[in-house]
Amino acid sequence: MMDACNALIVDDEADIRELIAMTLLPLGVTCLPAETLSEARALLKRQTFGLCITDLRLPDGSGLELVAHIQKQCPNLPVAVITAHGNMEIAVEALKLGAFDFVSKPFELAALREMVATALRLNRGGDGSGVNRPTLLGQSPAMAEVRALIAKLARSQAPILINGESGTGKELAARLIHLSGPRADQPFVPVNCGAIPEHLMESEFFGYKKGSFTGAAQDKGGLFQAARGGTLFLDEVADLPTPMQVKLLRAIQERAVRPVGAQTEIATDVRILSASHKDLAMLVQNGGFRQDLFYRLNVIQLRLPSLREHPEDIPELADAILERLGRQSGLPRAKLAPSALAALRVYAFPGNIRELENILERAFTLCEDGIIQAMDLSLPTSVESASPRPQPTTAMTADETFAEPANHGFEPKTLPILQPSVRNLEDYLEQIERAAILRALEETRYNKTAAAERLGITFRALRYRLKKLGLD
C-alpha cells in the first residue's frame, strides 16, 4: 500500500532538497533524495511514495521524462515539477504530460506546503463521495468515456476547459471533477462570467480594500479568496471582456491577486476550471479572446457530447428527471407512454439535457393520471428544432418500433386515417391533436369546459393546448 508520508525529491542541488525536506517536515512527510533521473527511477522500483517533486533540469535528462515514466509505471503517484519563475510554457507542458502540479523557484514555502497537502489528500480517500454527490447519467459509450476522463482529470491540478453545447451539463462535470479530487472538502465556487457587469468584474474576482472607491465601507474578499483551497469554475469564460482577460491571466500565472485599492498581492491556492459553449479557438483567431489566456485555460480539454450524440440515454435521463419531479412535488412519479418516449427519441434537443428537463417538467404538470402522452410534451414543430435524427443500432421494444423509419421492407399495419401526411413525427402528432380538439369543440358547440371533459383533460390543459396550437 502506498505510504503517503514518503516523498521522493529529485534535484541535483543539495540545498534545494534540504529546503523542501525542512518545509515538509511539519506535515509529517519524510523526504528521500535523488540527484539524477536514473537514481529516481531506481528508488521508484524499490519503494512506494505518496508524492514526487522533481526539478526539470537533471544531470542525465529532463524532469519531463520522469513525469512520463511515473504516468506509465506509477499512475497513482502525484508528481509535481519545479520550474523557473515565469516559465509557464514548461509548466503547462508538464501538466499535459500528467504532472499533478508545479512549483516555481524561488519557493513560496506556504504555497509549497499547500500543494503537498493537496497531493497527499489524493491518497487518503479525499474523493468527496457521499449520498448527495451528483452523477452523470447514461450508459452510452460517449458518457462512459466522459466519466472515465473525469476520474482521471480529478487527480491533476491542471486547468481544464470544458466544451459543449448549452444544456449538456458543463457545470455538473466541473463539480464532479472537484468532488472526485483532493480539494473535495474545500469550496467549489461557480461564476457566470457573462452575468457580472464589466465595471464590477475586478472587484468581484479579486476583492477590494475599504475606501478604495465610493461605497467600499469595509474590506471584501473576491471570488479567488472565496475559493481558496478549492475550485473556481469560470462558466461562459468567452464572455470575459479583454481588460479582465489580461488580469485573469496574471492571476493564473502568478497564483496571486491584488484586491482593488491594495498595494500588495495576495497568494491564492485555487484550481481553475472553465467552460464555454463557444469555440474559443475560433474566437482567438478572430481576435475575440486572448491567445495566451486560451493556452492557460486549455491545458486539458473535456468535451461533453450533445444529447443528439447519445439518444440511447434518453430513457434513463427521463426516468431520473421524472423521479426527481415526483419527489419534489410530493406526487406519484409520472410515467412516459410509449408514444411519448418515441417522440423524445426523434426530437433533436437543441437545448440538450436542460431542454429535456423543461419539457418533462411541463408535461408532468399537464399530464392526466400520471401518464405522459406525446401531446403532453408540446414539442416544438419547426423543421430545425424537430427534425428526426438517425437512430442508433440498439435493440428496441415492440412499443418503440414505430419510431423507426417506415422503410423496413414491410407495409405499416395502421389504419389509413392515421397515416402521416408529413415526414415529421411532431407535425403528425400536432395534426392529430389539432383535429381532435376541433372535433370536440364542434361537437360541444365550442363549450370549452364540455370539450375538455369530452377529451378527458382538464380545462387548464385544454386552454394550454389551444394557445399552443393558435386556436384560442
Image (tube, helix red, strand yellow):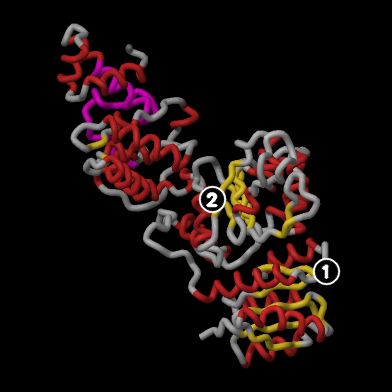
Residues at marks 1 and 2 touching, judged by CB atoms closer than 8 Å: no
Residue 304 badge: 2
Where residue 231 sits, quadrant-wise, is: bottom right
Q: Which quarter of the figure is the C terminus placed in?
A: top left
Position of residue 323 relative to residue 424, above or below, is below
Residue at point 76% right, 76% down?
Answer: 63
Determine crowd level at label 1: few under 14, some 14-19, many 20+ residues with C-alpha closer than 10 A. some
Q: Secondary structure at mark 1?
A: strand
Q: Amino acid at mark 1?
A: Ala
Residue 406 in view of the camera: no
x and y percentages locating residue 342 in the rendered image: 32, 39
The CA span between labels 1 and 2 is: 35 Å
> Which one is in front, 262 or 369?
262
> Which one is in front, 380 or 263?
263
Determine crowd level at label 2: few under 14, some 14-19, many 20+ residues with C-alpha closer than 10 A. many
- Specify whether 213 is left or right of 315: right
Residue at point 64% right, 80% down?
Answer: 26
Residue range corresponding to the magenta coloring = 408-437
x and y percentages locating residue 109 in the rendered image: 73, 72
Position of residue 104 relative to residue 224, above or below, is below
- Specify whether 339 is left or right of 171: left
On the image, numbered disc 1 is attached to which residue? 84
Position of residue 398 relative to residue 339, above or below, is below
Residue 411 inside the magenta-drawn segment? yes
Residue at point 78% right, 46% down?
Answer: 246
Residue 315 inside the magenta-drawn segment? no
Q: Earlier in the sequence, mark 1 or mark 2?
A: 1
- Specify whether 239 is left or right of 384: right
x and y percentages locating residue 443 in the rendered image: 16, 10
Q: Amino acid at mark 2?
A: Leu
